[in-house]
Image (cartoon, rainbow, N blue to C red):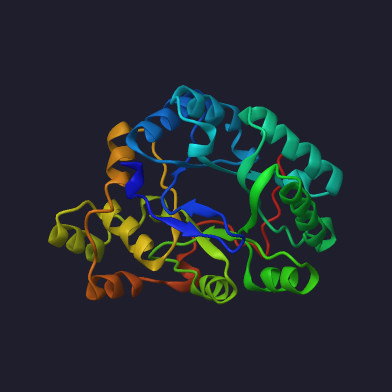
Amino acid sequence: MAGTIPDIRLNDGNTIPQLGFGVFQIIPADTAQAVRTALDVGYRHIDTAEMYGNEAEVGEGVRAAGLAREDVFITSKLNNGFHRPDDARAAFQATLDALRTDYIDLFLIHWPLPTRYDGDFVTTWKVLEEFKNDGRTRAIGVSNFQVPHLERLAAETDVAPAVNQVEAHPYFANDEVRAYGAKNGIITQAWSPIAQGAVLGDPIIADLAEQVGRTPAQVVLRWHLQRGDVIFPKSTTPKRIEENFQIFDFQLDDTAMEQITLLDRGEAGRQGPNPDTFDYIPA
């Protein structure tokens, strides 16, 4: 079943599975089993982060599935409290140790934090370049970067992010960021792809789901796939984990795609924090 997941080529020549499994807000006690279940279903991409507090359990779940390390694409992200170079180096090593692996497939700056660290996320990015150059991560990218943040990286560094992981769903299409990425070879990863469930009761989504004989979640995830987004829905329920995987044997026609796209509410549809002002650093 894993072979049904399309791979997307990144700007550095690596590839990433378009569908992954997310573990945000899955408590550590449940993480290993959820990851094991996802991998048994056929997922081959796991998305975690230092701030999620479950990297060790992700590693445990991967090992429990009995798959070769090179067959599982693992993404993690830098904790907001560790943007300074030496802190970032120590945090990255802690991620490798927690996962019990000698490399990460993709490592991201989790948030730009433009109101912290004198607004200097460029120096942090250059430290990620070190990790890529020494082979401890295959690819590097960013998360929650707005267009001005991306433009600054382009002006002050030589390596473009391979991906930008941002909030994106039918109520907040985030098209300005996506368009910049498309123009500059940066793949968009959509976190909160179903708006934390908020879009599932939308009458347009419900009607389309009935028309194609699928669940509302499957319809929304399919919309993302056809837009070219990388997605990683999360669940701890085996049935839902499997259901979210069953999105490769149907297509939405142009009319359905347009109906969903027109649900965009712009900034009013944003569910999470605005990256221009978000400044949370864990205690």
Judge left or right: residue 272 versus residue 12.
left
Residue 260 placed where, x, y %? 31, 69
The quarter of the picture where the N terminus appears is: top left
Looking at the picture, does residue 54 appear above or below residue 81? above
Of residues 49 and 134, the one nearer the viewer is 134
Judge left or right: residue 223 versus residue 120.
left
Q: Does the rendering let one see residue 240? A: yes
Residue 176 placed where, x, y %? 53, 75
Looking at the picture, does residue 251 appear above or below residue 131? below
Of residues 134 and 257, the one nearer the viewer is 134
Residue 35 placed where, x, y %? 44, 32
User: What residue is at 64 percent from the left and 56 percent from the top?
Assistant: 141
User: What residue is at 30 percent from the left and 75 percent from the top?
Assistant: 258
Specify the quadrant of the image occupied by residue 259: bottom left
The quarter of the picture where the C terminus appears is: top right
Judge left or right: residue 228 versus residue 83.
left
User: What residue is at 22 percent from the left and 51 percent from the top?
Assistant: 215
User: What residue is at 77 percent from the left and 74 percent from the top?
Assistant: 155
Specify the quadrant of the image occupied by residue 199: bottom left
Looking at the picture, does residue 259 appear above or below residue 83? below
